[in-house]
Image: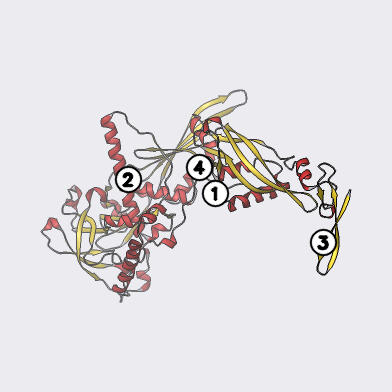
Amino acid sequence: MMETENQQIGNQIKPKTTILCSICDLAFTPSEQKTLICTNCIINQTDITIGITKEGIVNYCRFCHRYLRPPWTLCERESKELLSICLKRLRGLNKVKIIDAAFVYTEPSSKRIKVKLTIQKEVLNNTNMQQTFICEFLEHYQQCEDCKKEFTPHTWGAAVQIRQRVDHKKTFFYLEQLLLKYNANDKVLKIEQVDDGLDFFYKSRSHANRLVEYLSTILPIRVKQSKQLVSHDASSNLFNYKYVYAVDLPKVCKDDLVILPQKLCKELGGVGRVQLCYKLTTIVHLIDPLSMKCSDLSIEAFSLYENEIEVYNLKTHQHEFTVVDVERIHNRNLNESYISSSQNTFLPKLTKVTIIRESNNYVPITVKSHLGDILKTGQVAIGYDLTQLTIESLEDISNYPECILVKRQINKEARKLRIFKLKRLEAQNVMEEEGREKKRNQQKKQNDQDEQFEEFLDDVEKDKEMRKNINLYRDEEKIKKLSKEDLKKKQMKQVQQQKKDDDEWQDEDEDDIKLEDLMKDLNLEDKPELAEPVDEAQEEINQFITKLEKVTIEK
């Protein structure tokens, strides 16, 4: 049956024809649908979810609580990241448009994840249809690669044992940051921490060789190689070895007091026996506190006279000095080539510093120092007081300074305004002790190590050259705790100090770390994904997840 209705378009009246649906007998306009069935019957007769998988499996590691995306990603249950992983498990979403997605609440013990999806698709001419359905995913337990390496014994084929027999971990803290910055530990299976150093375990010998070669470019090292036969096949003449590289670092670190034997001093060109180590690279850099001339000591020479060289660390033998006056030593009449030589690195920074010490009844003493761009009147310097140290070899030395200034003391209250942090290697402590008394000793060692790391952060904060090889990250928690007034005080302090200082002296806070120079905190567990072919469905899912403000959970 056909009926005609009038439809007015402007001043003209155009007849509008309606017919009855062949299924439900309701009148509708066939010109709009271009079919003999009404819209409601089209919706009831059509299922746009055909071709879309409604079940899937999500791989889950119960030990580290990560899901396989890939790669293995740490995400919470009913989060946007987990929703993205579930949607990418479904097939057929490239032919429809996703309108909404939400989690349906399930118990975590059920190992089920339910997602309620609303999709849209064009069914007939200019007819878009929306439909809602539920997809169910099963959590399948699977160990990730990192957990397999951790729980499987005897999987390593080569090990690198780095040792430095000193009382502090200053060199290892710096080495740790270098490995993280240049990703030199990417192939490592496990890292173990011992009292004198670190142990790196690798699957193959080539990966261990790569680390040893990198260490030889940044530190003075001695390497000894050994191997142990694990198994062999006599018929095919195959042998399986485990390789161990013993890497020894010299027992000298930055800011250590070094007393050289007389024979070695002659080989270095007649330098003084009392030296100060100011830097450690592939060689040991020393400076004479009397003549302020620099000398380089190779690892071969250090190994030859290792039993005769005496080393005293700053942490155990440090003294505090109050700076009374700082006078710069001008070198205007010297040749430029003489000043720029490697032996005279600190010649432009030489100063005469007048200090007082509590042990000497505050009697002023004038000493030479290479800290001309750091020390200022009224500050407290840290160094060695040779008159208070009980060193037997000093009795045979006729000429040596009374005091040696090493660095400027940093106020511990300023640590509260520190806005940066450093990444750390995930190392297992294999020297854990049992028992109440032994646990106290272990806790004491841990507190001592934490204090040494804070002192290392102080050195990083004031040493611009050291920061070039270290990645500094923003400490978002510390920045949120600091009020706006504290940040303004820190900025005003830098501006006021810059106005007070003369142009010929470098400002002590000029090298301070600024917020805009820090990197954002990144997740080091995320590995770079391999290049995959572009999928339109995955791009659409990614765009939908980014636009999704909040994941809803229905009960």
Judge the density around disc 2: few (<14), some (14-19), many (≥20) Cα neighbours within 10 Å: few
Q: Which mark is residue 550?
A: 1
- Asked whether residue 3 is in view, the answer is yes
Task: Indicate which disc, 3 or 1, sits on the residue closer to the N terminus.
Answer: 3
Q: Is residue 466 above or below residue 206?
A: below
User: Which quadrant is home to the C terminus?
Assistant: top right
In the image, is 122 to the left or to the right of 158? right
- Looking at the rendered image, the disc whose residue lies closer to the viewer, 4 or 3, is 3
Residue 294, horizontal then vertical, whole percent: 32, 60
Q: Amino acid at mark 4?
A: Asn
Q: How far apart are the two marked residues, 4 and 2, measured between alpha carbons? A: 31 Å
The one nearer the camera, 546 or 265, is: 546
The one nearer the camera, 198 or 83, is: 83
Q: How far apart are the two marked residues, 1 and 4, measured between alpha carbons? A: 49 Å
Q: Amino acid at mark 3?
A: Gln
Say which residue label 4 marks. Answer: 209
Judge the density around disc 4: few (<14), some (14-19), many (≥20) Cα neighbours within 10 Å: some
Circles 3 and 1: CB distance less than 8 Å?
Answer: no
Task: Indicate which disc, 4 or 2, sits on the residue closer to the N terminus.
Answer: 4
- Asked whether residue 400 is in view, the answer is no
Q: Is residue 437 above or below residue 121?
A: above
Say which residue label 2 marks. Answer: 450
